[in-house]
Image (spheres, grey):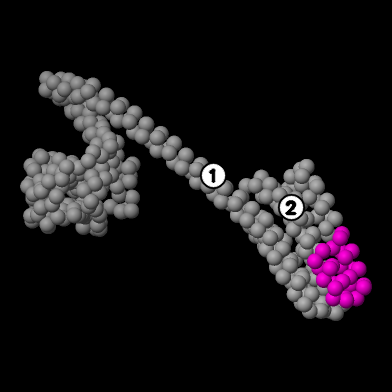
Amino acid sequence: MVPRARVRSVGTAFLRRRPLVVAPGMLITIGALLLSAAPAKQVLAVSIGMTAMLAFFAWESLRARRSTFDERYLARSLLITLCGIGVACFATGGVRSPLGPFLFAPTVVAFAAFGRARLFGAFVAMVAALAVLPAPFPPIARPYDLWIGVTAFVLAATLLRLGVAGLSDAYAAAANELDLAREAIVASAEARSRALESLGAKVAHEIKNPLASVRGLVELTAGEQEGRARTRLDVVLREVERIEGILRDYLSFSRPLADVRLARTDLRALCDALVATLDGRARRGSIALTVTGAGEAMADPARLSEALLNLVANALEATEPGGRVTIAVDGATIAIADTGRGIADLARVGTPGYTTKESGTGLGVALARGVIAQHGGALSFESGVGGTTARVKLP
């Protein structure tokens, strides 16, 4: 919507200029009636009515030069104008009056100003009354009715240009200001997001070094302890490892994704290397981890390996002991299937913060999706009672 201040400004300017547009039309109408030898009563009635209307417009114009009218007054003025034009039409032929086009000027300006059919009911009632009520005077003779009709069309169009075009410009200006404000908010939010990401990455990086020292001391001390003390230190060590994993995921996700360096990559060899890396974890969980198939693609081996590592690690964590995780390579497609419990809300997979693991962060899949997208590929998931399949399609 146009701000109210703009409606008031445009409406006041319209009322200020209106007498200059209407006055010539009134003079032409009265002159045409005189030349057409219309009844004296008709000429007198139209002259008095139009003079009163012009005086009202002139009074408004003088007020508009000193102050600004509000929306309520603008609506009331347009309604008075519509009624005055209706009376003039009634005195010059009723529904066939050549002044009929003037009825549209206040009605359409009201539509543009208030965004709804404020005068629509009054307009319909006015036209219906002109159609039903018998005209008190005979129709205006030719060609004088044509003169009045052409004048009415031209001046009505001029009034619409003053009112509607001004309001249209106000709408355009308001939309432009809204766009600028939206762009400023988005730019501010992006800058703040980048600043927070940078700060978070710096904090996470600074935590890594003392955490590594803590882990080393715990491992050293645990090797010298037995019984309950050793059990407690093992718990501490597992928690330290979990914190390190969270930091690793966060740093991988928060850092800007560097440009990938594409090269012809043997996907089977890449997946074999992943299995060798995660084989110990799979054995500890009594999970069968295997690779099948073969294929090649243009990829950045290091970045793609990082993404696949997250996906395979997730599959291992979702699989119960005795289950299996299979990495199937088929050309440029890699499918990682597990026999876990499945994912209930597939739509949220890959959203940072969403995870089905008690100690997860939800960043691993988001990182993998970003890396695969950089390669021009796509990551999709299929899940059911028998497990979940993460499918990586590379170009």
* Structural distance between the alpha carbons of marks 1 and 2: 27 Å
Residue nearest the viewer, comparing 262 with 149? 149
Q: In the image, what residue type sits under mark 2?
A: Arg
x, y percentage for residue 288? Answer: 10, 49
Label 1 crowding class (10 Å Cα cut-off): few <14, some 14-19, many 20+? few
Q: What residue sits 8% from the left and 49% below the top?
A: 266
Q: Is residue 256 above or below residue 271?
A: above
Task: Judge whether residue 176 is colored magenta.
Answer: no
x, y percentage for residue 92? Answer: 82, 73
Q: In the image, what residue type sits under mark 1?
A: Glu
Residue nearest the viewer, comparing 215 with 373? 373
Number of callouts in the render?
Answer: 2
Circle 1 sits on which residue? 177
Residue 314 seen by the camera: no
Q: Left or right: where does residue 106 sit relative to residue 140?
A: left
Q: Is residue 328 above or below residue 191?
A: below
The quadrant of the picture occupied by the C terminus is bottom left
Q: What residue sits 30% from the left and 27% below the top?
A: 202
Between marks 1 and 2 in the image, the one whose residue lies nearer the viewer? 2
Question: What is the magenta segment's predominant secondary structure?
Answer: helix
Residue 68 seen by the camera: yes
Q: Left or right: where does residue 161 sit relative to residue 202?
A: right
x, y percentage for residue 20? Answer: 76, 55
x, y percentage for residue 345? Answer: 32, 53
Q: Earlier in the sequence, mark 1 or mark 2?
A: 2
Q: Which residues are magenta?
A: 27-52
Task: Judge whether residue 39 is colored magenta.
Answer: yes
Q: What residue sits 66% from the left and 45% below the top?
A: 5
Q: What residue sits 86% from the left and 68% below the top?
A: 46
Q: Which mark is residue 142?
A: none
Circle 2 sits on which residue? 17
